Each structure stands twice: as C-alpha cells, then as structure tokens.
Image: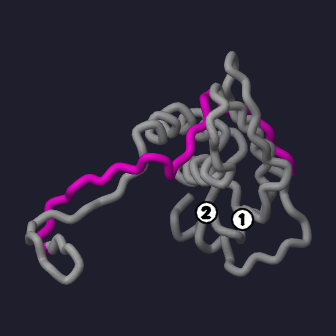
Amino acid sequence: MEIEFIIPTNPRPKKNNPRIMWKKSDKPFQIKFGNFVGATINYRPLIVPSSSNEEFENEALPILRRIRDEIGVIDFPCNIQAIYYRDTKHKIDLTNLHEALHDAMVKSNLLLDDNRDLIAGTDGSRVYYDKSAPRIEVKIVEMQDYTQWNDTVSKQQKLGI
C-alpha cells in the first residue's frame, strides 16, 4: 500500500521554544536552589509545546483527519517519507520536524502510534526552502517483512478505532 498527500503549511518543529505553564496542584511543589528550598507553592510546572507548533497542528489536523476518513487508520509497519519545504533558511533539525508531523498524525488518529512497530523508517526525508509555497509532501509506504514487537491490531480494538 502507498499513500501520498500534501499538507499546505509551513513545517514547524515541536521542541523549539517550549513554554512552561503552571497547573494548580493539591501536592506542594518545592522550588529549590541546590539544597536550599526557596519556596513551596501549590502549583506544578507543565511543559507545553511552542505556540508555533500549536498553529502547525491546527493547520495540519483537519487535513490528516480527512486522509484518515478516506483510508482508515494506519496500523501496519511503514516508511514515512516527508519532504519539508520551509519558508525560511533558518537552521532546523529534521528529527524535530518528524516528531511534530508524527505526533499530529497520531493526534488525528491517522496513525495508531508513532513507535517503532509502526514507523519502521523515515527514509528519503529531506528539508528544502520554498518561500512561496511552504508545505509537507508525505509518502507512506507499507513495509514488508518487518517484525513488529507488539500486536497493534489488539491495541486498535482496545481504543475503539
């Protein structure tokens, strides 16, 4: 099986500029400076992705959900080749772009999980510059003769997908 689609958005990484939010907690949290406790508060730090990653997900999720509605959930080992066309030439890590794309694919239920049982490879992925038409060109190819360590069909049934 081979699936190809384009996400017409500027690819953005997940890990750049994460934000720290504070969540109310029943259990006290100690702010320490070495061994010295500077303060005790009833909030816990929560690290959330950057606002640009949230924008990326908001743009990509409707497209990924439409693809899922057309082809179903990917629950087989595959190679996900992603050609990223960014609108800037800023330094970027390919693995961070992959993480953002794969997490969005899982969040949309297009991909059952983003572990090694399903994403067997990302061969052929690249990052290019295209100021006028930033996008992600995705090609998913089923991997033959690849051994999964866990039963993904049972997991899919448990999740009710």
Instruction: Say which residue appears at 71% left-offset and 71% top-offset.
Output: 117
Looking at the picture, does residue 68 appear above or below residue 141? above
Instruction: Say which residue appears at 90% left-offset and 66% top-offset.
Output: 144
Kindly state the secondary structure of the residue where label 2 is placed: loop
Looking at the picture, does residue 94 appear above or below residue 145? above
Residue 35 is situated, as x and y percent measured from the top left of the image, at 19, 83
Looking at the picture, does residue 122 appear above or below residue 101? below
Q: Nearer the viewer, residue 33 or 115?
A: 33
- Compared across the picture, whether 65 is left or right of 23 comes to right
Instruction: Please report the bounds of the magenta region as a residue range.
Output: 1-28
Instruction: Say which residue appears at 60% left-offset and 66% top-offset.
Output: 156
Per the image, the residue denoted by label 1 is 118
Residue 61 is situated, as x and y percent measured from the top left of the image, at 54, 38
- Identify the image quadrant of residue 8: top right
Q: CA distance from mark 2 to mark 1?
A: 7 Å
User: Does 18 lie within the magenta span?
Assistant: yes
Name the quadrant of the C terminus: bottom right
- Identify the image quadrant of residue 143: bottom right
Look at the numbered discs 2 and 1 and tell me whether their residues touch, using CB distance below 8 Å. Answer: yes
Per the image, the residue denoted by label 2 is 113
Q: Nearer the viewer, residue 57 or 13?
A: 13
Kindly state the secondary structure of the residue where label 1 is placed: loop
Task: Confirm whether residue 87 shows in the render.
Answer: yes
Q: Are there few (<14), some (14-19), or many (20+) residues within 10 Å of tag 1?
A: many
Looking at the picture, does residue 147 appear above or below residue 11? below
Q: Nearer the viewer, residue 76 or 92?
A: 92
Residue 20 is situated, as x and y percent measured from the top left of the image, at 30, 53
- Is tag 2's residue or tag 1's residue first in the polypeptide sequence? 2
